[in-house]
Amino acid sequence: MSTAVEQKGNWRRLAALRKLPLTLGLIAVLWIVGATTGSLLAGPPEPLLEQVGIGLAVEPGPWWAVFTSGFFASSLLDYLACTVMILIGVGIAERTMGPWLALAAFVAGSALSALVLVALVEYGTDNSDQWLSFLGGEYVVGAYGGAAAALGCSTAALESLWRRRLRTWLVAATLMFALFVGVAQTLQALSGAVIGILAGWAAQSWILRRQAGKLHSSSLRETRFLVGTVVGVFAVGPLLTQLTGTLDVGPLSVVSQVMLQASPTADEVREACDDDQSCVTLQGVVGVQSFGATILSLIPVLLLLVCAEGLRRGRRLAYRLTLTIQLYLAAVTTFAVLQYVTDPDVTLGNDDVGYLLLYAIPAIVAPLIIVFLLLANRHKFRVESSDASYRVLGRTTLIMAGAAVALYALFWFLEGNPGCSTGWDLAGQLTHILVPFPVPFVTELPQGLLSTVLYGLGGDVIWLCILFLVLGNYQKFRAVATDPAADLGHARELIHDGGGSLSWMALWENNQYWFTPDRKAGVAYQVHNGVALTVAGPFGAAEHHADAATGFLAHCSALGLTPCFYSATDELDGPLLPRGFRKLEVAEETLLNIQTMTFKGKEWQNVRTALNRADKLSITDQWHHYRMMPPGIRAQLAEISEEWVADKALPEMGFTLGGLDELKDPEVLCCVAVDDDGLVHGVTSWLPVFTDGAVTGWTLDFMRRRTTGFKGVMEFLIASAVNHFKEDVPQISLSGSPLANTDSRNTTGSGDGTDPGEGDHSALDRVLALLGNALEPMYGFKSLAAFKSRFQPEHRTLYMYYQDPLSLPSIGLAVGSAYLPGLSPARSAGLLRHMVAREPAQ
C-alpha cells in the first residue's frame, strides 16, 4: 500500500513539472549546449569563452555575450547550481506570470545584470578597489542573474504576504552570497534580484494598477521578521565561506575566522603532539580533528539560527543572546585587528591598508550594525518565557559548565598536563570548551585520553543541550492572566451574553483568555507549538465579535504567537479575510431544527426502532444536572466512562471534546437512559447556548454507552433530547466530528482577490489526515459523523482561519497537541507509528 502511495506522489510531482515547459526547456538547453561544446566539466574552452562570456575589465567581447553567458557554466558543479537556480527562479516565474513573461524576465535580467556587473568591475578597476579589481581580467558565465531577475519580477503577481517574504528572502540570499563569497556570479545574482524586484514593483504600480498592499497585521511582526532574517543571513554566511573554500573573496569572508572554530592542520597537530603518533591518532578520533570538532564549528551557526527564530517570535531571550554574541564578535575582531596593526614586526603598506579597509573594517561594522538594529527595535522583543523555564535553563547551564570545569581540571592534573602546559593553557582550554567561538589566543593541546575526550566533545554536549533548552524556552510564556479564576468567571458572564454553539467549551480546563479593552467580548485559546489555537470564535455580545477577532491578532503578535481560529463559523470572514487570512474547512456541524421534527417517514426508521425497543425494555430518559443525580447513577457514569477509556490505546481527548469532568458544570444538562433496575445504558450531556442572557440552543458533547447496553441507545437519547428541548429552543446542535472530514477540505483565499494556490495547505492536510486516520480505529470520528447524519440534520461548516501558509505544519501539530494533551512519550511513539503506517484518507 505504501508503495502505491509513493508512486502516486511521484506521478503528482511529474505532473507538476510538466506544467513548467519553459523552465524544463531552459534547463535542457543549458545541458545540451554544455554537452555539445564540451563545457560540462571545466566550462567553455578559452576561444568559446571569449565569444560567449562576459568580459570583466578585459576585451569586452561581442555584444551578444550578455545574452549567451546565461546558457553556459564554469564547471559541473556550476551547471548543477545553475539548474537549481533556473528551476526555482524561472519555475516560480512561469507558474505566476506565464511562460512568455518569464522568458522575457530571464533574458532581460541576464543582459541587464551582466551590464551592471561589467560597470561595477570597471569602476572598481579604475579606482583600485581590491575586491572589484580582483574580479577583473576574467570572463563570467552563469544563469544566476537571469534566474534571480525572473524570480524578483514574479513577486509582483503574488499576494502581499508572499510578495514581501519572497523579496526579503531573495535580497537576503543574494546579498549573503555577494558579501560572504563575493565572486562575480554572486554580484550578478544580486544585480539581477534588484533589477527584477524593481521591474516587478514598476509593473505592479503602473501596469497592474495596485498598491504594494501592506499587511494589515501590526508592523511588529514585519520588523521581527526582518531582524530575524538579517541575523539568519549573518549566521549562515560564515559557514558558506568555509564550504566554498578558497573561492570566497567577499568583504565579509573573514568573519568565519572569528566566528567558527577552525580545525588545525595535520602538521600543526603533529607539532603540538611532538610527533607522537598515538597523540595524533587520539586527536583524530576524539580531539581537535574529530567529528566532534566539526560539530563544535557548527555550534555558532546553530546558535545564531536559533536566535534568529527567537527574534522572529519576539523573544527577549533571543534578543539578549544575539546582542551578546554580536558584541563579542565585534570585540574579538577589533582586538585581532589592533593586535595586528600594533605588532612592531608588521609594516603596513598600501596593500595592507586596503586589505584592512576591505575586509577587517566590514567584519567589525557588520555585527555592530546588527547591534544597532537590535537596540533600535528593543521594545519589539519583549516576549518573556515563564520564570520556571528561565530557572531550568540557567540552573542546567551552570551545572553543566561547573561539571565540565571540575572534571576537566581533575583529568588535566591527573594525566600529567602541568608538566608540559601552564595554568594559562588550562584557562584557554576551558574557554575552548565553554565558549563556542574562537578565542584570540593560542593554547597547547591537552595530553591524555580523558582530557582530550572532554576537550573535543565537552563543548558539543554542553552547547547542544543549551540549544535544546533555548528552543524549549521559546515554547513557554510568562502568565498573561494575573487572576485566572477571575478571567474564568468573566468568560462565563460573556458567554451568557452571546456566543456560538461551541462557546461553552471555552470554560473548560487548559484554556487561556483574552478580552477586549472594554471587556465586552473575549477569545479562549490554547498555546501549542507556538500557535495560539482558539476554541471556536469570539464570545460575548455579537456586535463585539469582529473587534475581538482583530484585537486578538494584535495580542498574538505582541506575544510572538501564530494566531489560528479553529472550529469557527463564517462570521469571521469579514474581520479576517481582508487581513490576509484564509479559511480551511475542518468540520461540519450538524444542526437539528427540532420544532419541525416528528420522526415520521422511512428515513426515521432507525430512530423509531430505538424508541420502540426502549419502550419494550422499560428504559426511560432521565434529565439531571450532574450534582443533582442520584449517587448510584453518578457511580455508573464513572464506571461507563472508565470502561470506554480503558478500551482505547490513548487517553481521553480534550480541546473540543469533553469528558466526565465537564459534566459537573452546574449549567450542563445530562440525559441518562435508565431501565427499571436502575441500570444506566447510556448518557449524553448538553451544553447551553446563550443569546442576551437567555438559552437559545443546546449542543451535544459527552456521549457514552455501556458495552452491554441495548442497541440503539444513542438514537434513543438524541430523540429524547429532541422531544425534551422542542418547547424551549428552536434548534439544537449535535456538534461537529473532529478530524472526520480530512478528505473534503476547502480553502478560501484572502481578501485581495488572489488564490492561495493548491499547495498552501497540503502540509496541514497531510498532518490532520494522518492524525485522523491513526485515531479513527480508537475514537471512530468518521462513524460518529455517519451516525449523526441519521437525524437528517442541516450542516454548518466550521473553519480554521490562518494567515501564514508556512505555519500550517505547526498548526497541524498544535491541533494534535490540543486534542491529546499530556501524551506520554511511549504513547506518542505509538501514535506516531500508527500515523506513518496508515494511508491517509483519499
Image (spheres, rainbow, N blue to C red):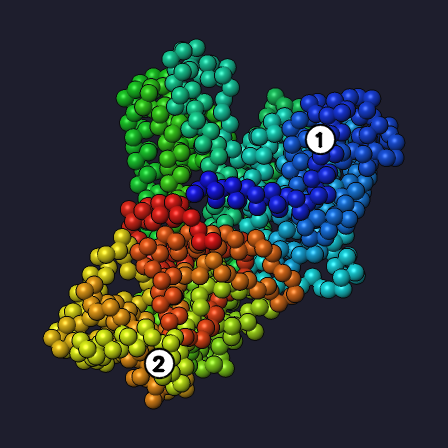
Q: Amino acid at mark 2?
A: Phe
Q: Earlier in the sequence, mark 1 or mark 2?
A: 1
Position of residue 699 measured from the top left corner of the image (x, y, whole percent): 35, 76
**Residue at 48% across / 42% down in the picture?**
4
48 left or right of 640?
right
Position of residue 828 measured from the top left corner of the image (x, y, whole percent): 32, 49
**Residue at 30% across / 53% down in the picture?**
823
Query: Front-most of 284 and 93?
Result: 93
Which residue reaches farthest front? 602
Q: Secondary structure at mark 1?
A: helix
Position of residue 54 measured from the top left corner of the image (x, y, whole percent): 80, 32
Report whether residue 421 is seen.
no
As drawn, 790 above or below 309: below
Which residue reaches farthest bottom? 727
**Residue at 41% across / 81% down in the picture?**
593
For mark 1, what is the residue? Answer: 31
Query: Front-most of 236 and 552?
Result: 552
Query: Front-most of 332 and 437?
Result: 437
CA gap, disc 1 and disc 2: 72 Å
Q: Amino acid at mark 1?
A: Trp
Report whether residue 758 is seen.
yes
406 left or right of 257?
left
For mark 2, what is the residue? Answer: 599
Label 1: how many Cα within 10 Å (few below 14, some 14–19, many 20+): many
Label drawn at residue 824? none
Position of residue 697 measured from the top left corner of the image (x, y, whole percent): 37, 82
